[in-house]
Image (cartoon, rainbow, N blue to C red):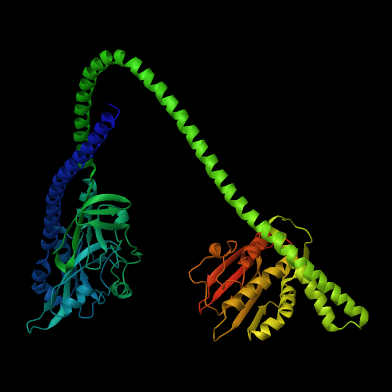
Amino acid sequence: MRVLLPALSICLLVCAVAVFWASFFFFRGEELEQARARLSLYRSTVEAELQRFAHLPYVLAQDPFVIETAEGGSTAALNARLESFAAQAGIDAIYLMDTNGLTIAASNAGTQASFVGQAYGYRPYFRAAAKGEQGAFYGIGATTGIPGYFFANPVLNDGGDTVGVIAIKIDLSELQDSWQEAGERVILTNADGVALLASSPAWRYRTLQPLTTDQRETIAAARQFGNEPLEPLAWSVKSSNAATLDGETYLYLRSDGFPDAWALHYFATEGQARASAWLVTSALILIAGFAFIVFQVQRTRQIRFALARSEEEEAALRAANARLAVEIDERRAAEQRLQKTQAELERAGRLAALGQLASSVTHELGQPIAAMRNQIAAAEITATPTTLTQKLHQLVDRMEGITRQLKFFSRKGRDQFETFDLADAMRSVLELMAPNIQNDAVDIRVATSETPVTFHGNRLRIEQVMTNLIRNGMDAMEGCDTRRIDIDIGADDTQTWFQVSDTGHGLEGQTLSDLREPFATTRESGQGMGLGLTISAGIVDDHGGEMTANPAPSGGAVFRATFPRNSEGHAI
């Protein structure tokens, strides 16, 4: 039952989701059909309103009174005649302009919003009529500030010459008022995507997309929308039948094919479709829940009889599981102790081998070094000390120091730490190795900062690291045509480093972990014991640093020792 219940829950959830979306798309399809019907109705209403008066300017252009006034006759009679026509037709205004666009007669003559004396030669409808065509244009009235749709026709004399332009203005605000009262979301846009009419005042004179500079210049020249900023509308089309508007998602339909490339946009909410889908889904869940309850009642009766028989078996099983859990914990603990012991044994074995080697080397080198020191002392007694004897003294001191470093694996600590310049330590190393460098014809190039690179640590052990890295680089270049070692010493705000790059044979696929293993060496038998990098890496670790080894871009290898810096600017 523990498996069945989640499975049934998941199955019910999947079925509920499937039913919800299936019913949602079904009801959404019905909503779309109803939206198409309403959009078709609104389209017919807009077309009828536009076409209802489209013929009137042509008829007026044939009126003898209009022609006579356009040719220079009296305007008083025509003003009264146009006022009567406008009142009977129910339109905003009828007005007559001369060939320059100056209004000479109008239905609203004598009122405060009179068109008489106003020049409209810049309007597109006037320019079209002046060319002999019927002009049509939607815009905000330059005189009244009230938007409207304008029709215009040329007034021709008996000779067929254009002597004026007759125009009418239609108020379409009743359309958007009816949309708003019906709670619809409708937008009528022109060819530039500017909302001419909209059911919401906030959408009027907004654009479906940002206007180009040319479009804005054309609109400004025609004074089509007055001082409206024509900002973009907050909307986007998500699919062919869905769009977001002011942050909400709507069903979206568009109707094109209007005159002047106008388009009608209709937005319908998905709320009814979503509510119906939730109703169907809830009914399904209730039915499934009732069936499940009936099923559970029957199953509970069966379980009640089986429970009594299984109590003893369950108790025994729990006890067995508890014992098994204890055994598993004990086995895991034993395995962890075994792994730890094996790791300690391996480490102890390596340290023991290194300790024996260090003891043997220290013992074997102790007597020759002591003999050399005695010989140098005897030579100084019998003769005047020279630069050579001083250098020999330094070499013997360094040999003794190196033998002491073989005790590195059993002696760790911060004894004899001092603050020194890494560049100065590198110069001491290069001076000591000068004969070897000269004999091997190695080109040494050192790059360091102008200021001292201070370091706090055991100078002798750091010099041993430098010596080992340079010695390894020289050995790696044996048999190479180009024998150059680049040394870089530097520091920044967080770390100090020195780096040794050679032009040798490279790492040959090995990593630093492989190379720092005790007795690991690529040199021929008898040429080295493979402890140089082991000791060097240990010295760097003791100083809190990190050693890395990487192939050089131009061949060879790059060994780098990096140390963190403390608040005083010295390497730790």
Establish if 194 lies above or below 452.
above
157 left or right of 481?
left
Establish if 463 lies above or below 344.
below
559 left or right of 309?
right
486 left or right of 269?
right
Can residue 457 be seen in this snapshot? no
- What residue is rendered at 91% in x and 83% in y? 384
336 left or right of 14?
right
**Front position in the image: 133 or 546:** 546
> Which corner quadrant holds the N terminus?
top left
The image quarter containing residue 439 is bottom right
- What residue is rendered at 20% in x and 75% in y? 126
**Front position in the image: 308 or 435:** 435
Q: Position of residue 259 (x, y in %)?
A: 14, 67
**Front position in the image: 221 or 166:** 221
> Which corner quadrant holds the C terminus?
bottom right
Establish if 311 lies above or below 253.
above
Establish if 283 lies above or below 463.
above
The image quarter containing residue 91 is bottom left
Can residue 453 be seen in this snapshot? yes
Q: Position of residue 125 (x, y in %)?
A: 20, 73
- What residue is rendered at 81% in x and 79% in y? 391
Tally of marks: 0
Q: Position of residue 64 (x, y in %)?
A: 8, 74
Q: Position of residue 173 (x, y in %)?
A: 23, 56
